[in-house]
Image (cartoon, rainbow, N blue to C red):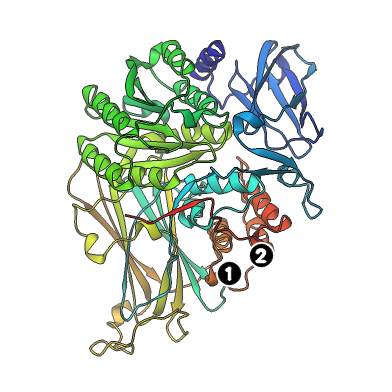
Amino acid sequence: MGTALIALAAALSTGGLAASPVQDSTGTIAGTVTDSVSGRPLAGIAVHVVRSALLATTGADGSYSLSVPPGVHTLRVLSVGYGVAEREVTVVAGKTTVADFALVASVSEMGVVMEARISPSADARFMGVSALRMHRPPLDREGYAHIAENDFRLVASSPLSTFSIDVDRASYSNVRRFIEDGTRPPVDAVRIEEMINYFPYEWGEVAGDHPFSVSTEVWDAPWTGDHRLVRIGLHAEEVDVTDLPPGNLVFLIDVSGSMNSPDKLPLLKNAFALLVGQLRDEDRVAMVVYAGAAGLVLPSTPGSRSERILAAIEELDAGGSTAGGEGLELAYETARENFVDGGNNRVILATDGDFNVGPSSDGEMVRLIEKERESGVFLTVLGFGTGNLQDSKMEQIADHGNGNFHYIDGLLEARKVLVEEMGGTLLTLAKDVKVQVEFNAARVAGYRLIGYENRLLAPEDFSDDTKDAGELGAGHTVTALYEVVPKGVPVPREGGVDSLRYRPEDDSDPPSDFADEMLYVKVRYKDPDGATSKLLAQPVADRVVAPSADFRFAAAVAAFGMLLRDSRHAGDYALDDVVSLAEGALGSDTRGYRGEFIRLVEAVRDLKMLETDGADDRYERTPRR
């Protein structure tokens, strides 16, 4: 295992993940992955060639194929519910070597009871979800912050909408994990803005003096024909990984007893091996672990010594309680001691979020993080595992620690976050990024922001540079969608307020100079080491144009999120409508993320998940502090 990790790092440092061997000097490894008991093919399983850092994913029939150099290779399959399987194969140039895997369910390790159940309504196109249901024990207490969905607001009384950006992606991969388990996600696990922002979009080049650009589009809302849908996008400039500033990274790894399952510490080790393989000589890594107590197990070590870093990762074992607060303090102290001026100083916390010794309440953890962020050290939070995932706690830690939050549900997601999106995950280009939209009462009667419920700010917070907000990393894109009710169309609201005496709804129109404007977008941000914000601003015309494929796809994701949340704002829109809209907006989809989304929607439809209650009592609903 340790040798495999070291070989992985060496392969990554020389060839990376993008390189594919030349066809005439390679052989092929092909096979199928099945369940050892039922013989059922397992789809969506990652097959990893540990000595070349190449990955393949099994299709609906459980098959996979890989082109690799001739020689002896070790294949590794890591799948939640089955644990780790490995085998050694010999590859000859121009020949195909067959390597099949029959995986044995790892019931005792997962702590779940697994029941084979074929659903007659299931669609075989989905990734094997229909054949396996996972029934979790009563101890399953995952924690999610309660989200009260944004309602429509009247422009006459609330012309300003203000929020902090959110570049977290955790909700989408977590929702995917539930659906792949054949279970409807808890309502509060569905954060629509994170689902929309999971996907890469095309925005063009960033020009000018700012590290990001602002783009807008206006379209007819697909679920309500007489409403508009407005897309506001922020796109940060790309930074080549080789051009990143020197990294001072501290891995803060949870090795408590709750991490002792295949989808936690074993997956974590493989995920960090991918990251270690991307390190350069000028980067440095230290490692802090915590269980019953916290300790420094690896002093700050240059990236050129990847073998030493990987050996420290491989030696990790899980056991004990969870001194999360003590671990955070030691990790920040280590980062400060090795601080690199102008570098990427960052703590990377990997955990299931189960803090239960020392500072453990959400409020205490937030105050600790807020104190530490003043040091100039940023934070990345990686969530792992099922059963006791403390999503609410990890989201708040990342939000208040100048950081981002990702949920790692498999090796492919680890590669997406730590390799493909490494710049955005690890390098902050702008901090405390806030958006404020002013709506033109002459054109707009009402509006609602789709998602971002946990990121709303008071109007006066926009110009207050002491107020914390979200961070934008290299290559990050942020999409916000507003559903807008044109002037003269009734605003669908529950409850509401009486008309204002001193500012009635028929207030006089603004000057004719602004007659064609629907809204005015303003963005404030600070440089990563700055204390004073900078401002971008631009108007948006009340003009519907043919929507881009990215806009249509983002709308499909938003509609899916609304349906998962039982939103009344979805109207009569159905899952078939989501599929149709997304299929027409696939674009190039080189990584297959959009195709996977369509399969998830189809699985929810075919397994009739929306007919079950998403508010499961097994999952804690934590109020925001």
Neighbor class of circle 1 (other Cα within 10 Å; few <14, some 14-19, many 20+) is some
Amino acid carrying mark 1 in the image: Pro
Neighbor class of circle 2 (other Cα within 10 Å; few <14, some 14-19, many 20+) is some
Is residue 47 visible in the rendered image? The answer is no
The residue nearer to you, when weighing 406 against 389, is: 389
Q: Position of residue 226 (x, y in %)?
A: 53, 79
Quarter assignment of residue 329: top left
- Name the secondary structure under disc 1: loop
Residue 577, disc: 2
Residue ID at (45%, 77%):
485
Q: Is residue 587 above or below residue 37?
A: below
Quarter assignment of residue 133: top right
Question: Does label 2 or label 1 sit earlier along the sequence?
Answer: 1
Q: Which residue is mark 1?
A: 222
Horizontal side of 489 relative to 580 (left or right) equals left
Q: Is residue 573 above or below residue 507?
A: above
Amino acid carrying mark 2 in the image: Asp
Q: Quadrant of the N terminus?
A: top right
Q: Position of residue 530 (x, y in %)?
A: 20, 43
Residue 107, disc: none
CB atoms of marks 2 and 1 within 8 Å: yes
The residue nearer to you, when weighing 334 against 200, is: 334
Horizontal side of 525 relative to 290 (left or right) equals left
In space, the residues marked 2 and 1 are separated at their CA atoms by 9 Å
Q: Is residue 516 above or below residue 318?
A: below
Horizontal side of 571 relative to 116 (left or right) equals left
Residue ID at (35%, 33%):
324
